[in-house]
Image (cartoon, helix red, strand yellow):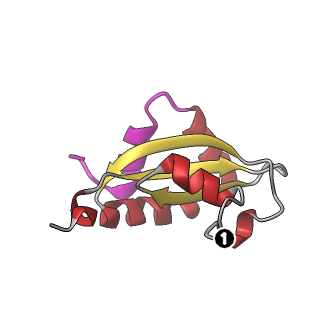
Amino acid sequence: MDLKCCQMWRLYIIRCRDGSLYTGITTEVRRRMEEHRGMGNKGAKYLRGRGPLELVFHVKIGSRALALKAEHKVKRLPKAKKEALLKAPRAKDMIIELLGYSNF
């Protein structure tokens, strides 16, 4: 049985030392953060040399396809809207709105 089809994907946002925000998806946030922090060579090139890195947001999305759509939408937001998402008490609802879904 292929477990990848059934894994819960998450959207995450990292704040870099320079204040920039990086958005990504993963099934294991802790492992992905370790990769980004240089514990392995699988971290995003964008994040190299931008540490310390702070995980400022993560939310369960569901399937990989849906997570990729959410990542794409969030990456296209201006920084001010990403910051608003980080402060929103119902951030998942905002992501659902971005995706255009009424049922998530």
Amino acid type, label 1: Asn
Magenta segment: does it hold 51? no
| Residue at (66% x, 70% y) in the render | 41
Front residue (pair 104, 3)? 3
Q: Position of residue 72 (x, y in %)?
A: 48, 66
Q: Which residue is mark 1?
A: 41
| Residue at (83% x, 49% y) in the render | 17
Mark 1 falls on what kind of element?
loop
Residue interval drawn in magenta: 88-104
Q: Quadrant of residue 32?
A: bottom right
- Res. 77 in view: no
Q: Position of residue 39 (x, y in %)?
A: 67, 59
Report the side of 79 relative to 68 (left or right).
right
Front residue (pair 39, 100)? 39
Report the side of 75 relative to 4 (left or right).
right
Front residue (pair 57, 97)? 57
Magenta segment: does it hold 92? yes
Q: Position of residue 73 (x, y in %)?
A: 48, 62
| Residue at (58% x, 57% y) in the render | 23
Residue sitting at the far top: 89
Q: Quadrant of residue 90?
A: top left
Up the image or down, 53 lies above or below 89; here it is: below
Which quarter of the rendered picture does the N terminus lie within?
A: bottom left
